C-alpha cells in the first residue's frame, strides 16, 4: 500500500453536510448574524439572505424609518411576512433581526421548517459591536446600550434557547464562530 495515499485518507476533511431546509440565525443585535451568516453561506455553498435587508427592500424604507413612521407593531408584521416568504423550503442561510424570533408565528415557522441557530454573546461583546453602528438600531434610540441589551437579553434569551443549536459568538474573528456552527451542524 502506498504510504502517501494512507496519509491523504487520514488528513482529508469530512464532507460538508447536505441541507434540505434553511438555516436561520437568531439572537440579539450585535451577535454577528449577518456577518457570520454570509461567511457560513459561503462555506456551505448556499445562498445568503439578510431578512432586515429584504424588509427594507420590500418597504422601500430603512428599518429606522419603518419604526419611526409605522411603529414596531407594523414592522414586526412586515418582518413576519418577509421571513415566511424566505422560508420556502430551499436550503439557504437566513440572518434575522433580533426580535423576529419573539413573534410566536415567526418562531413556530422557523422551528418547524428551518434549522434555528442561536448566536449568543457576552454583554460586553454586544455593547462594543452595537456602538460601531450607532443610530441604526431603533430599540437603542436614546438609551444606554448596555442597559437596553441587558433588558432585551433577559426577555429574549429564554425564547432563543428554544433553538436546537446554540453557538457562542466570541470576540474573535467571525470565522471562529462559523467553525463552531459547522461543528454543531455536523454533530
Image (cartoon, grey):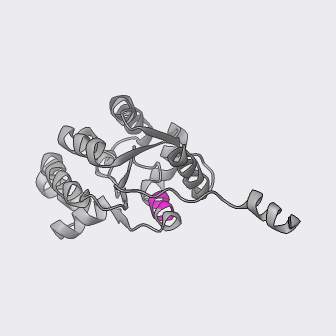
Q: Is residue 146 above or below residue 47?
A: above
Quadrant assignment for the N terminus: bottom right
Q: Is residue 88 left or right of residue 19?
A: left
Query: Residue drawn 86% across and 67% down?
Result: 2
- Front in this rendered view, residue 106 or 3: 3
Q: Is residue 123 above or below residue 172?
A: above
- Front in this rendered view, residue 19 or 81: 19
Quadrant assignment for the C terminus: top right
- x, y percent for residue 59: 16, 66
Q: Is residue 141 left or right of residue 5?
A: left
- x, y percent for residue 60: 18, 70
Which quarter of the picture shows residue 67? bottom left
Q: Is residue 98 left or right of residue 103?
A: right
Q: Which residues are magenta?
A: 35-40
Query: Residue drawn 20% across and 58% down?
Result: 82
- Front in this rendered view, residue 172 or 14: 14
Which quarter of the picture shows residue 165? top left
Characterize the magenta stretch by its predominant secondary structure: helix
Q: Is residue 149 above or below residue 42?
A: above
Q: Is residue 112 above or below residue 61?
A: above
Query: Residue drawn 39% across and 68% down?
Result: 47
Residue 184 on the magenta segment: no
* Count of number-bearing discs: 0
Q: Is residue 133 left or right of residue 137?
A: right
Residue most extreme to the front = 1
- x, y percent for residue 121: 51, 41
Amino acid at each position: 500500500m502506498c504510504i502517501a495515499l494512507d496519509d491523504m485518507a487520514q488528513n482529508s476533511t469530512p464532507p460538508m453536510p447536505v441541507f434540505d431546509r434553511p438555516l436561520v440565525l437568531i439572537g440579539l443585535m450585535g451577535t454577528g448574524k449577518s456577518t457570520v451568516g454570509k461567511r457560513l453561506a459561503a462555506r456551505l455553498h448556499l445562498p445568503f439572505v439578510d431578512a432586515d435587508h429584504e424588509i427594507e427592500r420590500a418597504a422601500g424604507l430603512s428599518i429606522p424609518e419603518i419604526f419611526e413612521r409605522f411603529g414596531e407593531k407594523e414592522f414586526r408584521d412586515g418582518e413576519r411576512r418577509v421571513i415566511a416568504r424566505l422560508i420556502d423550503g430551499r436550503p439557504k442561510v437566513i440572518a434575522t433581526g433580533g426580535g423576529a424570533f419573539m413573534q410566536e408565528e415567526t418562531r413556530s415557522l422557523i422551528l418547524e421548517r428551518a434549522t434555528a441557530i442561536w448566536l449568543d454573546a457576552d454583554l460586553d461583546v454586544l455593547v462594543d459591536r452595537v456602538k460601531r453602528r450607532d443610530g441604526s438600531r431603533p430599540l437603542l434610540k436614546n438609551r444606554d446600550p448596555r442597559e437596553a441589551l441587558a433588558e432585551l437579553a433577559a426577555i429574549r434569551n429564554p425564547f432563543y434557547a428554544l433553538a436546537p443549536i446554540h453557538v457562542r459568538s466570541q470576540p474573535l474573528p467571525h470565522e471562529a464562530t462559523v467553525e463552531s456552527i459547522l461543528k454543531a451542524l455536523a454533530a
